[in-house]
Image: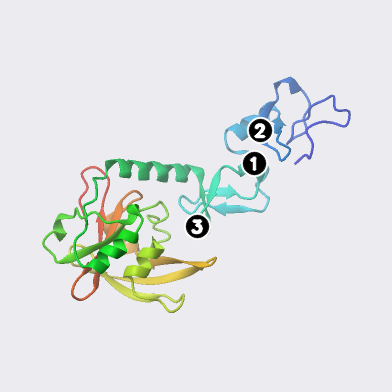
């Protein structure tokens, strides 16, 4: 890539990418440079940039390409041209801006359509723990199959695109929820865990945490068969319950698509 958009005489503008100087009056702005100015691009290079295919066209053999954790699209990370086309994820990896926007829209629509959550009842310890949870994780009891079962709602989570990815087949559990309601872990090694669905079927998963900077990221793994069976998708809401006595965990799913049923 050229390091300057002007020739030595300063009288002729060069395309920042191909250094073409013909018809410079029609040059268009590209990305913002460290100097604060915009890279000047000829019609051809500017068109490629505006269509979002600049790095694919000119940087295909360069280092720094990574997969979007949601859709698998390749993104050229570390390149100033692609600086605004991806987000860094809390647990590592990246997500392209298209998937990030989809997740935001799903979350916003879910929040707008949600009813006001009822005040949970039950033992004071459970109530105190739920009070500490962020509002988005506080469960809403709406699943009809559970109304006649003696269980206590624990927390809920809106599924992200990565949570619904069959290739990953895992669910990230919010840290406060994991440490409050799941079995304690003495190390990063996974342990088997059995969880019921709301129809009474028992599913075998694995539970573990990944060291994440100075914190931990808790995950439930081996969910592929469950995900396929329940048809869960990004934007659905998964809710965890606890049967008492016995401390048995139950996982329910509220599908957000029209005409869907609870699982």
- Compare residues 93 and 1 and report the one nearer the observer: 93
Q: Could you tell me which secondary element the residue under label 1 belongs to?
A: helix
Please identify the quadrant where the C terminus is shown. bottom left
Mark 2 is surrounded, within 10 Å at the Cα level, by few (under 14), some (14 to 19) or many (20 or more) other residues, namely some
Q: Considering the numbered disc 3 on the image, is that residue within a helix, a strand or a loop? A: loop
Instruction: Give SS at disc 2.
Output: strand
Q: Residue at x 59, y 38 (%)?
A: 53
Residue 141, above or below 208: above
- Mark 1 and mark 2 in contact? Answer it, CB < 8 Å: yes
> Do the numbered discs 1 and 3 sit on residues whose CB atoms are within 8 Å?
no
Residue that numbered label 3 is attached to: 90
Residue 14: image quadrant is: top right
Eye-nearest disc, 3 or 2? 3
Dot 1 crowding, Cα within 10 Å, few <14, some 14–19, many 20+? some
On residue 81, the disc is 1
Q: How far across and how far down the image is residue 184, in percent?
A: 37, 76
Reading the image, the residue beneath label 2 is: 30
* C-alpha distance separating marks 3 and 2: 30 Å
User: Which of disc 2 and disc 1 is earlier in sequence?
Assistant: 2
From the top left corner, tell me how far across and down residue 76 is, in percent.
61, 48
Compared to residue 166, the image places residue 111 above or below, namely above
Relative to 48, 180 lies left or right: left
Q: Residue at x 75, y 35 (%)?
A: 18
Q: Is residue 232 left or right of residue 67?
A: left
Image quadrant holding the N terminus, namely top right
Q: Earlier in the sequence, mark 1 or mark 3?
A: 1
């Amino acid at each position: 890539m050229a390091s300057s958009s002007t020739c030595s005489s300063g009288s002729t503008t060069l395309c920042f990418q191909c250094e073409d100087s013909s018809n410079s009056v029609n040059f268009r702005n590209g990305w913002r440079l460290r100097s604060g100015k915009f890279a000047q691009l000829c019609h051809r290079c500017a068109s490629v940039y505006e269509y979002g295919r600049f790095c694919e066209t000119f940087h295909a053999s360069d280092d720094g390409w990574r997969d979007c954790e949601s859709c698998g699209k390749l993104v050229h990370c570390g390149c100033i041209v692609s600086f605004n086309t991806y987000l860094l994820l809390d647990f590592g990896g990246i997500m392209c801006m298209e998937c990030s926007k989809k997740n935001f829209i799903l979350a916003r629509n879910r929040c707008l359509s949600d009813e006001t959550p009822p005040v949970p009842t039950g033992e004071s310890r459970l109530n105190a723990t739920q009070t500490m949870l962020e509002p988005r994780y506080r469960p809403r009891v709406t699943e009809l199959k559970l109304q006649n079962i003696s269980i206590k709602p624990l927390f809920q989570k809106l599924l992200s695109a990565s949570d619904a990815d069959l290739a990953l087949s895992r669910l990230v559990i919010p840290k406060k929820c994991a440490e409050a309601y799941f079995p304690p872990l003495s190390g990063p090694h996974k342990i088997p865990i059995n969880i019921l669905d709301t129809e009474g079927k028992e599913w075998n998963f694995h539970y573990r945490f990944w060291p994440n900077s100075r914190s931990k990221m808790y995950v439930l793994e081996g969910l592929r068969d469950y995900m396929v069976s329940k048809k869960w998708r990004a934007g659905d809401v998964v809710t965890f319950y606890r049967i008492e006595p016995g401390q048995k965990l139950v996982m329910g799913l509220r599908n957000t698509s029209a005409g869907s049923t609870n699982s």
